[in-house]
Amino acid sequence: MRKICTLAVCAALLLALCAPVRAEKKAKAGEEEGPKLPVVMYHHISEDESRCGKYVVSEETFRKDLEYLDLLGYETVSLEQLLLWKKGEAELPEKCVMLTFDDGQLSFAEYALPALEEHGMCAVTAIVGQYADEYTQNGDTDARYAYMSWEKIAETVSSGCAEAACHTYAMHSLQTRRGCAKKRWENEADYEKVLSTDDDKFRERFSSFLGGEPVAFVYPYGSYCRESVDILARRGYGIQFTCEERVNLLSRADEVLLLGRFNRAQDELRERFFSRLGIA
């Protein structure tokens, strides 16, 4: 009995000694937590409200979104700012938000860019290289459905209110796999070859028309896996976007900033939508 009591006392003392250590670690972890970054995912903008829906918003809706963010004192964050923050070379605004546009449609240049310039904000446009090639060649500039040519992409980037990210060269499809996701039976070496071949082509086009290298990758359909994150990180994509609807708690310790985004649908009330992002 005496032996049992002695062991109990020793265990209690050990727990008491460890408690401050755990508390100290918890405090340090809290101190190291980075800012929260909500990210909005837009796709297409239309002048025709009858065409608006889950992935299409009206020009008026987009403009009023910017006005709402402006009114609440939010500042948009660029990829460049985010990378500088990650390196410890800059701080992010207390009230920050990131805006993204998937697919590189011409409506971004026609309707979103003027509104961004007016409010002194910026957005990331995710380019599908294959689409940019197609509309560079055919010269079609109908904003109802067309995608931006490489020349138009370069023009938007030069405005200072837009940055271009990779949305794959030709993997924005569900025909052979879900976007650039790994197939279940595919080994890692084969998968890396497929993903790298596509990315090489995108990077060649990006470098030719925009100069430099892309730093952010946007997963088609939000489909990613451990292998894709690692492969793309090795290829220089320190920022990767998913379609998971979550507010991002940033950490400089993370090798890759794997960011969730909230899809902006036309029919959701503005206040309700932004409240889901913690913006109110």
Image (cartoon, rainbow, N blue to C red):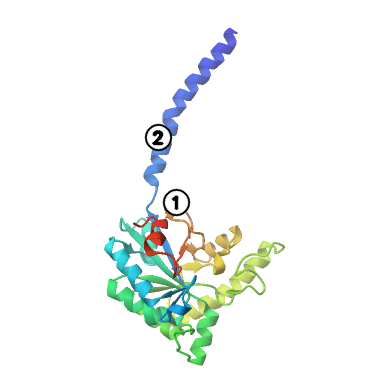
| Residue 125: assigned label | none
Q: Residues within 10 Å of mark 2 (few under 14, many from 20)?
A: few
Please give the residue where the numbered disc 1 appears in the rendered image.
Answer: 253
The reply to whether residue 160 is in sight is no
Q: Look at 43% across and 65% down and name the residue there.
A: 268
Q: Single out the residue that lies furthest toward the right.
A: 185
Q: Does label 2 or label 1 sit earlier along the sequence? A: 2
Q: Residue at x 44, y 56 (%)?
A: 247
Q: Identify the residue under disc 2.
A: 24
- The image shows residue 85 at horizontal and vertical percentages of 36, 58
Element at label 2? helix
Q: Out of 257 and 48, give the one closest to the viewer.
A: 48
Side of 237 relative to 90 (left or right): right
Q: Nearer the viewer, residue 273 or 183?
A: 273
Q: CA distance from mark 2 to mark 1?
A: 19 Å
The number of numbered discs placed on residues in the rendered structure image is 2
Q: Amino acid at mark 2?
A: Glu
Res 267 visible: yes
- Disc 1 is placed on an element classified as loop
Relative to 89, say whether 28 is above or below. above
Nearest to the observer: residue 171 or residue 64: 64
How many residues crowd around disc 1 within 10 Å: few (fewer than 14), some, or many (20 or more)? Answer: few
Residue 84's image quarter?
Answer: bottom left
Disc 1 residue type? Ala
Q: Quadrant of the N terminus?
A: top right
Q: Position of residue 95 (x, y in %)?
A: 32, 57
Task: Report the residue at 38% width, 51% height from top.
Answer: 34
Question: How far across and down, in percent of the image, does residue 140 sit?
Answer: 48, 90
**Quick one: quadrant of the C terminus?**
bottom left
